[in-house]
Amino acid sequence: MIRDTLHLKAPGNWINDPNGFICYRGIYHLFYQHFPYAPQWGTMHWGHAVSEDLVHWEHLGVAVFPTKSYDRNGIFSGSALEVDGDLYLYYSAVRYLEEEEEDIHHAKNGHFETSQALIISGDGCHFDNFGQKRQVIPVIRDRKVGDAVNTRDPKVWKSGDWYYMVLGSTWKGESGKAVFFKSGDAIHWEYAGQYQHPAFGTILECPDLFQVGADYVFIGSSIHLMGEGLKYSDASICFPAEFQEGSCRLELPDKYQMVDYGGDLYAPQTNLDKEGRRVLAAWMRMPKAVESEDRGIWNGMMCLPRVVESAGGHIYFRVHPETDQFFSRGLEACSQMDMRKPFRLKTALEEGEGLDIGGYRITVKEGRVTADRSEVFAGLDGYRLVNRTPALGSRIQLDIFVEPNLIEIFVNDGEYVLSNVVYGLKHEISGFTGRIFTGG
Ligand code: FRU
């Protein structure tokens, strides 16, 4: 079976969103949206990978695939919950009403419908796709509640005696909304409320709502949030939230943060790690596939796991302690480094200073960390090449993780993160003073 270290990557062909992220019976399970037949999006399956430490991953193949008339065209995103020792996987079940003649993996004219479904596994290894699935929320046909086409990505959690579910949805495809359901047994669900926010774009996808310490945090992925006419107009955002259990009343401030300021990260999902920290996994969108010996052509990978914290109305995404520990081997100089393997650079920059990692330029301009990937994104049109964090103080700490197709910059211990997919990094670093670490 295929193994990954640090970043979970497509085991071949295509992956997108993380799904069903959970620590179940002492093992981390991370499922993912997967099209096993070509390096492009198509009829969705859930691929499955496991890890003991969030660093070393083993792919276990396809766990969930279409078998029912309600999910015949796709097992869309969803989440996992342990219920009485079993692993419950909630997902969105897609059924096309019309399909493209020349590509049956796409619905024609957006003509499809979505319901919410559940598959139960007794051990987290075996998934009976024929006998253990059930539809738990039928297609929502009441517009006042949700949308028959675009209501999806159930995130489920338990609090007290109740199970809660938040779904991404839309009002007529024009404005995104979150829809809540409640259940006493994790199987029978009833509508419990909804919430709209201007930053939810035209459709809200992959909502997540959770507590860190005393605070609630809401994360969502909004379609058409960024109106710059560039690719990746869909973006993942987060807010400090107020949420009343029972009534499912949600309140969010007007202002939001980006989960990541690089513009590539999308569809994050969180859960608790073994120590009870809130950890985030997310898809790093790749505009073109790459090829490697162990898995052939592949497209899509996950970011490093990030610990979510909240303080003073700000949401932090910090380096996970297991990642920190992995990069424990310090090097004396850049020349000792093998740039084909993952490495980590720690440094501090002041206004006007910068460094260049193989053609990826990081500078501080007007107090903002600015990353320019123009030289390592050749031939790809229509994407934002220069990305920036909001303004910070005068001296900025950077903790930078690099591997051949991804650079992740944790700024001031996770105050902001800026990550970019890159292609063709050169084997040279300039302008760097600081500490270098490699792993393993
Ligand atoms: C987000 C998303 C989800 C959906 C899935 C389909 O990237 O569009 O809303 O469930 O991907 O692959």
Image (tube, rainbow, N blue to C red):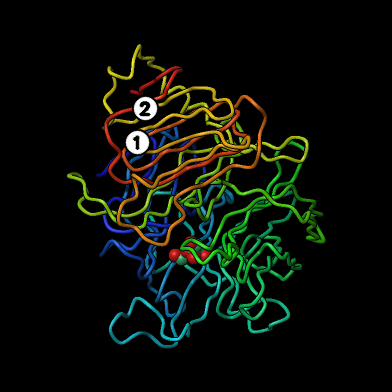
Q: Amino acid at mark 1?
A: Glu
Q: Which is more toward the observer, 362 or 403? A: 362
Q: Residue at 22%, 50% (x, y): give it.
A: 291
Q: Residues within 10 Å of mark 2 (few under 14, many from 20)?
A: many
- 36 relative position to 78: left or right: left
Image quarter of residue 79: bottom right
Q: Where does label 1 land, which residue? A: 403
Rendered position, 343 above or below 229: above
Q: Nearer the viewer, residue 38 or 115?
A: 38
Q: Earlier in the sequence, mark 2 or mark 1?
A: 2
Q: Looking at the image, which residue sits at the far front?
A: 352
> Is residue 372 depicted above or below 232 in this figure?
above
Residue 289 point in image, percent of width and height: 28, 55
Q: Residue at x 78, y 60 (%)?
A: 248
Q: In the picture shown, does residue 424 fall above or below 209?
A: above
Relative to 87, 392 lies left or right: right
Circle number at residue 343: 2
Q: Is residue 118 visible?
A: no
